[in-house]
Image (cartoon, grey):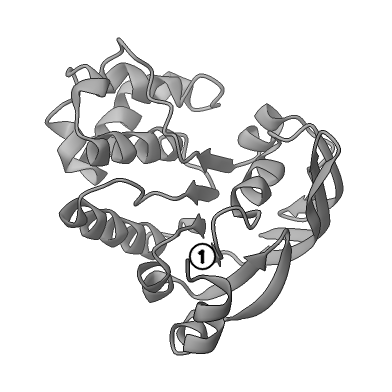
Amino acid sequence: MLRVEKLNAWYGSSHVLQDISLDVNNGEIVCLIGRNGAGKTTTLKSIIGLIDKTAGRVEFEGREVLSKPAHARFGAGLAYVPEERRIVPGLSVRENLRLGLVASPNKKKEAELIDRTATIFPRLAERLDQVAITMSGGEQQMLAIARAMISDPKLIMLDEPSEGIMPVLVDEMFELFRNMKAQGTTILLVEQNVELALSIADRAYVVDQGTVVHHASASELLADAEIQERYCSV
């Protein structure tokens, strides 16, 4: 579904990504792991089109998208949930969900899609008319994911979804990811909680200093204490 070949990215003159290559197959959960600053977030931002200077090749469902603007990549079925959530202040949960349909061809089915999303995210169903930023951090994270999911993307990229969230909600969220996969959603996940990420993933790439240094099945990496210590420990 997604193929990245020799992806390079720059912030100004700083060469952050250096020949990143990875692929994600339909129906998989694939995670990127590594220390903070390794280039994982920049990889996701480059794939969705939020980095100004990039080179290489990104194919989505066989079509080259690196030359396309971010909104075109979204329209093709790619979705991205940033680490900072970007919940809009002053808007209700329902209104934040509606923003996920602004550029969607399914916008005319707004009420139906909001109802469907609320059944997937029962915590949000109880709070549709609540001002979104008054919810807990974990509930706001679920809203950010729901806002990306409401447009029915083919692949969703999640950046550090467990960051700053209480453990009970993290467990609930990762159970949600398992359910999303079971229903056919493909996921590319960046997550600092390595054991948790590998417990739900099919495969994983280890990123260090802007390049992929290791690739294996999630079960292999989960059992490989040496790789985790070398590239993921603080």
Q: Is residue 5 above or below residue 92?
A: below
Q: Position of residue 59 (x, y in %)?
A: 77, 53
Q: Is residue 79 above or below residue 212?
A: above
Residue ID at (23%, 60%): 171
The answer to whether residue 131 of the structure is visible from this angle is yes
Residue ID at (63%, 58%): 38
Q: Is residue 184 above or below residue 41?
A: below
| Residue of label 1 | 27
Name the residue at the top extreme. Answer: 90
Q: Position of residue 205 (x, y in %)?
A: 61, 71
Identify which residue, 6 or 36, lies in the foreground.
36
Three-letter code for the amino acid on which mark 1 is drawn:
Gly
Count every numbered label the image shows and give the total.
1
How packed is label 1: few (under 14 Cα within 10 Å), some, or many (20 or more)? Answer: some
Q: Position of residue 48 (x, y in %)?
A: 66, 40
Please indicate whether residue 113 sits to the left or right of residue 231 in the image: left
Label 1 secondary element: loop
Q: Is residue 233 above or below residue 162?
A: below
Residue ID at (36%, 48%): 163
Please indicate whether residue 195 sits to the left or right of residue 68 in the image: left
Name the residue at the left extreme. Answer: 126
The answer to whether residue 24 of the structure is visible from this angle is no
Name the residue at the front extreme. Answer: 234
Q: Quadrant of residue 14?
A: top right
Q: Position of residue 12 (x, y in %)?
A: 82, 33
Quadrant where the image shows the N terminus: bottom right
Please indicate whether residue 137 sits to the left or right of residue 25 in the image: left
Identify which residue, 131 or 16, lies in the foreground.
16
Identify which residue, 187 or 164, lies in the foreground.
164
